Image: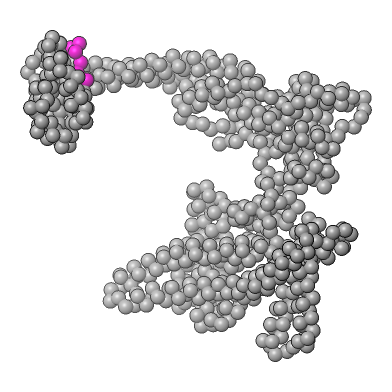
């Protein structure tokens, strides 16, 4: 339930180990590389002067960015074609081994396998192309089956050309209406539902003009073979026999192709994995620096990954020099440490909701646990129903286990449990309040109590938000915001004073005279108004106002007014928790009234079922969104910035 600590790790070694190291790092997925040159130019990449390091220190004078001169595009296309032929693109850990580290060997093997595959594949493609041509020929002959002339006589005329066309019904009518303008003899040979097949005999001298007319009518030309002898219906029998023989040949070559792919399955997987490993290795190399003799590599490594990294480096027999620093030990603040969230299984699904707002910055409090607890309580309070909560629970279970939507399914499961819990408190089962007794309260019978409880809920959440905000600011040493800001100690004390005054008025028990209250509020508003000069005085700075006193007081004055308005509006916003609890009951009452008005028992049951479906889908979505709104706008604004960077190590993705 925190943000894991990061280590900046700088590695120096001989170039002969560079390729192997980057591939082992990609397999382990433990490092997020940063620019090694940037680290070297700072004072964080420091090598101790010793006899062991002397050669490395001298070589730093010739350092340069690592440049890759290999082109993998051709190999990539070949591997993708082989993987596609196998109808699988999975990469598994067992396919990655030491032999795949040498991509030169892999490329040589790839060339051999791909060449054999392409020979078989070309045979298959040629046969399939020939099969398609024969099928087209057979189709053309089918349309000519009623022609009583030998095929060679109608396809090899000296002064005329015979053509076969397919045209739509409407365009055929247009052709018939313009027969006198077409220099061709046209005869319909086949009529289908939406189109017509016709044969045309055209003088060769007028062929170009005729083709232009047919093209304008969207006529599709059907190729007629001219190397067969006999009547069309007899030739069609011969072509059908040729198609069957050709299909037998295709079947045999495909069996041969499948046997080849099956025999080389492991080899192709090795090649695919080798390329993936080479690609990820190159990602790490691109951030490195090097000389002719040495490489310099930098990156962020989480604390929990350091053990694995050290084990990995031990395989190089002390040939790699390691420089390790934590973020607070670094002078270069330009490279921001990435964020890796660490939450237990109960709260982990809510990380996705936090990340929709922003990634926590390194050193900031992870708001996941706070959001998970407050959001779950608010949703249950607004959508309290045993039956409908059970539906959400089952929906979450299906999403997580059947559709692999782990985060969304996990959130739905927890919201369903909360809804069931509040459903027992409200005594509601699928909207009905006559099935079980309420353990705590009936919302529609205690409207004022529900609304007041919602505001009390909100006040408690806001107070916790203030505390988290103050903690975050002090951890970042932001004294201006932490002590004197509207989300800091000054704003917190003002809000507590306002709540205390309201309670004393409600219970008619004034704790302090009104004059003291006025002084109290003015004091903390002045702290908020003068937060910048007060901070500069405490820090001993010579300048009180960084942008000028006039501009500062105008801006800060508006902030004071905004503080008063936001505290009031933020508190009242939580009244919607109670309002939706009432609305939830009211919606079912409406459907229940409609069901009671019908005279059919079946219709009544149907209305109640449809009503519950609408409530679960429509109101459930609205409550889900409203809960997020309260979290993002009323609570996160108090303590959370979300300006961090996600930890994204370079890693081979296994499928």
Q: Which of 349 and 353 is in front in this view?
A: 353
Residue sitting at the far top: 158
Report the side of 327 relative to 207 (left or right): right
Magenta stretch, main secondary structure, is: loop
Residue 389 to residue 286: above or below = below
Quadrant in which the C terminus is drawn: top right
Residue 433 to residue 275: above or below = below
x, y (%) of residue 542?
Answer: 88, 58
Report which quarter residue 71 is drawn in: top right
Q: Residue at x 77, y 29 (%)?
A: 296
Q: Residue at x 65, y 61 (%)?
A: 636
x, y (%) of residue 183?
Answer: 11, 22
User: Magenta includes 224?
Assistant: yes
Q: What span is colored magenta in the figure?
A: 223-230
Q: Residue at x 13, y 34 (%)?
A: 174
Asked whether residue 96 appears in the rendered view, the answer is: no
């Amino acid at each position: 339930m925190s943000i894991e600590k990061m280590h900046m790790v700088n590695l120096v070694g001989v170039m002969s180990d560079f390729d192997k190291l980057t591939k082992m790092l990609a397999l382990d997925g433990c490092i997020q590389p940063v620019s090694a040159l940037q680290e070297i130019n700072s004072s964080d990449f420091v090598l101790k002067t010793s006899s062991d390091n002397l050669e490395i220190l001298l070589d730093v004078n010739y350092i340069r960015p690592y440049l890759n001169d290999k082109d993998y595009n051709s190999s990539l296309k070949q591997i993708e074609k082989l993987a596609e032929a196998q109808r699988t693109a999975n990469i598994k850990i067992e396919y990655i081994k030491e032999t795949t580290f040498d991509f030169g060997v892999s490329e040589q093997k790839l060339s051999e396998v791909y060449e054999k595959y392409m020979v078989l594949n070309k045979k298959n493609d040629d046969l399939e192309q020939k099969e398609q041509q024969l099928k087209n020929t057979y189709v053309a002959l089918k349309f000519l089956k009623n022609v009583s002339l030998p095929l060679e006589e109608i396809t090899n005329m000296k002064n005329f050309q015979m053509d076969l066309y397919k045209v739509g019904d409407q365009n055929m009518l247009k052709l018939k209406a313009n027969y006198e303008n077409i220099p061709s003899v046209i005869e319909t040979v086949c009529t289908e539902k939406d189109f017509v097949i016709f044969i045309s005999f055209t003088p060769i001298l007028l062929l170009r003009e005729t083709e232009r007319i047919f093209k304008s009518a969207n006529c599709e030309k059907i190729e007629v073979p001219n190397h067969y002898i006999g009547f069309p219906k007899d030739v069609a029998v011969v072509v059908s026999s040729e198609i069957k023989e050709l299909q037998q040949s295709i079947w045999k070559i495909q069996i041969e192709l499948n046997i080849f792919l099956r025999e080389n399955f492991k080899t192709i997987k090795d090649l695919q994995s080798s390329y993936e490993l080479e690609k990820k290795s190159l990602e790490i190399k691109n951030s490195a620096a090097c000389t002719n003799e040495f490489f310099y590599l930098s990156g962020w490594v989480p604390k929990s990954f350091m053990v694995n990294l050290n084990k990995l480096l031990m395989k190089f027999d002390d040939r790699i020099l390691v420089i390790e620093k934590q973020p607070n030990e670094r002078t270069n603040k330009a490279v921001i440490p990435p964020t890796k969230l660490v939450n237990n299984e109960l709260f982990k699904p809510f990380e996705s909701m936090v990340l929709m707002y922003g990634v926590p910055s390194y050193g900031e409090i992870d708001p996941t646990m706070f959001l998970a607890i407050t959001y779950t309580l608010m949703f249950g309070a607004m959508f309290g129903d045993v039956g409908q909560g059970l539906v959400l629970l089952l929906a979450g279970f299906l999403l997580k286990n059947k559709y692999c939507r782990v985060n969304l399914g996990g959130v739905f499961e927890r919201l369903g449990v909360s809804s069931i819990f509040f459903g027992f408190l409200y005594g509601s089962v699928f909207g009905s309040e006559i099935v079980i007794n309420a353990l705590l309260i009936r919302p529609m019978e205690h409207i004022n109590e529900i609304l007041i409880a919602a505001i009390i809920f909100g006040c408690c959440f806001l107070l916790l938000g203030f505390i988290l905000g103050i903690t975050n600011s002090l951890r970042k040493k932001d004294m201006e915001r932490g002590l004197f800001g509207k989300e800091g100690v000054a704003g917190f004390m003002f809000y507590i004073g306002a709540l205390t005054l309201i309670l004393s008025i409600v219970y008619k028990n004034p704790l302090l005279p009104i004059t003291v209250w006025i002084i109290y509020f003015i004091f903390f508003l002045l702290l908020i108004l003068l937060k910048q000069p007060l901070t500069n005085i405490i820090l001993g700075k010579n300048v009180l106002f960084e942008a000028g006193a006039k501009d500062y007081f105008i801006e800060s004055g508006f902030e004071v007014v905004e503080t008063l308005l936001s505290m009031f509006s933020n508190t009242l916003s939580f009244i919607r928790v109670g309002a939706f609890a009432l609305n939830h009951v009211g919606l079912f009452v409406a459907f229940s009234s409609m069901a009671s008005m019908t005279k059919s028992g079946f219709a009544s049951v149907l209305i109640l079922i449809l009503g519950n479906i609408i409530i679960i889908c429509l109101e459930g979505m609205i409550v889900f969104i409203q809960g997020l709104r309260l979290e993002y706008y009323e609570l996160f604004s108090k303590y959370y910035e979300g300006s961090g960077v996600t930890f994204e190590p370079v890693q081979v993705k296994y499928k």
